[in-house]
Image: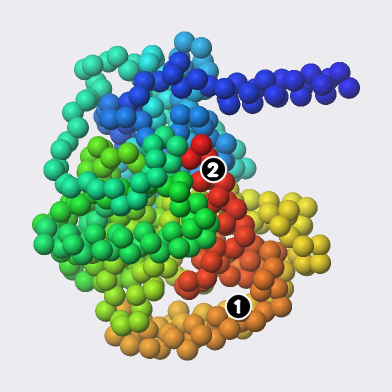
Amino acid sequence: MKHILSLLIIFFIFCSSYSQISYDKFFTNKTMRVDYYHHGTKSSESFSIDKIYQEPEWPGSKINLIDTLNLGEYLFKVFDLETNQMIYSRGYSTIFNEWQTTDEANTGIVKTYHETIRFPFPKRKIQLTINRRDKQMRFKEIYSTVIDPSDSVNISKDIKNYNFKVTKLMYNGSPNSKVDIVIIGDGYRKEEMEKFRKDAEHLNNVMFNTSPFRERKNDFNVWLVEVISEDSGIDKPDMNIWKNTTLGTTYNFFGSARYILTEDNKSLRDVISSVPYDFINILINDNRYGGGGIYNLYTTTYTITDSPGKEWQIEYVYVHEFGHSFGGLGDEYYSSQVSYTDFYTKGVEPWEPNITAQTKKENIKWKHLIDSDTPIPTPWEKTAYDSLERERAKLDRLAPDYYQKREPLITQAQNILKNTKYANKVGAFEGAGYISEGLFRPAIDCRMFSLSLTNFDPVCSASISKIIDFYSR
């Protein structure tokens, strides 16, 4: 009994030491931005510092300094070198770790991506470590460096001024106690700025009319940066279309026609360096269905549709991708074409809060939301649904009659989701994370599952609410 009591005392001291970190003791009111290169192959990786910056006032929470969310493939930690106390941490994911799961990585080539991490500017020397999950999902240190904040030679205070107009689309209070989103555009020429403003306002309204964001609207600020590009639209490599844009976004990322990302991380960070932000949403002034979202990195969303009546799909993409970048939510679908070959390791529980490999109720991370009479795994008409999805996969996404041929298949599939016995229950429905068998999602349908304006399921909603709490306190 004494042994258990001692362990409990140590545990509470350990936890309270994190919760009682004094911001003013360790940090100034500025932001430290660390840009670095992430190199490697499918099975190896290394890091090298590019440049360190002192940026304007720290926009994040001054209370929740230690990450307790346990989300992301990576976790960076900041230690006060004098006391060896961890004073800041955040989880995140990267383009690099997604690339490692592609066919290109399987060929053995070496790839380099530019990345950024940000934290309050420290008052004295720190040790910065980058940690990655191992096969058992435990974080292991893979990089470490010491940074002296008084190093005036190697820490730049030169903030690039692009003279892009900055406005407050939605403001509810100090950035330190709000979730701050910055919305920027790529592929908008100067004469298209009015379109950008309308796109941003419309999609922001869509977001905050969607639960649980609707109920928590007052916990957010939203900023606009009117980024001007030389050309209208963005690159479509598969069509030999190339555009000169400020952020360098492109379709065909990882060979997927609809996946939109940018490798020009430095330009992205420079453009928004004067704006208080926690999360980045990039609007794409182009007409091909597409987007992307990576946890604690950014989202992309296309904004033009050539198919009348399909404007809702833009709204779907915007909120869905924010579910990835903000909520750390995994894709719950499994039949769409993706470029990943082994995104999830068989038999290993994913870190995403809405995907599980468990088949026993007592081991499922959302077990508290499952009714006692709901069977696990939860039965549904998966065979019939998969047959419709196979027919849809045969269609050419770029063909002019794609939507016309796809519509009846989607209608039949949605009828299955609406009418199945456990449609309104939380359970464990097989098929998730790009895998048909062996991974399970919490509900039969969700904004992270089907191409529709359905709500987030209860598990996704709870996870999003938890993150809003973390960043707005």
Q: Residues within 10 Å of mark 2 (few under 14, many from 20)?
A: some
Q: Looking at the image, which is closer to me, 223 or 382?
A: 223
Q: Where does label 2 land, which residue?
A: 469
Where 200 falls versus 425 (above or below)?
above
Q: Where does label 1 land, which residue?
A: 417
Q: Position of residue 135 (x, y in %)?
A: 59, 44
- Give the amino acid at mark 1: Leu
The residue lying at 19 percent from left, 32 percent from top is 159
Where 261 falls versus 57 (above or below)?
below
Which comes sooner in the sequence, label 1 or label 2?
1
The residue lying at 78 percent from left, 67 percent from top is 375
- Residue 292 as seen in the image, left or right of residue 305: right
The residue lying at 20 percent from left, 52 percent from top is 226
Residue 305 is at least partly visible in this image? yes
The residue lying at 39 percent from left, 30 percent from top is 119
Residue 339 is at least partly visible in this image? no
Q: Residues within 10 Å of mark 1 (few under 14, many from 20)?
A: many
What is the quadrant of residue 254 in the picture? bottom left
Q: Position of residue 410 (x, y in %)?
A: 49, 82
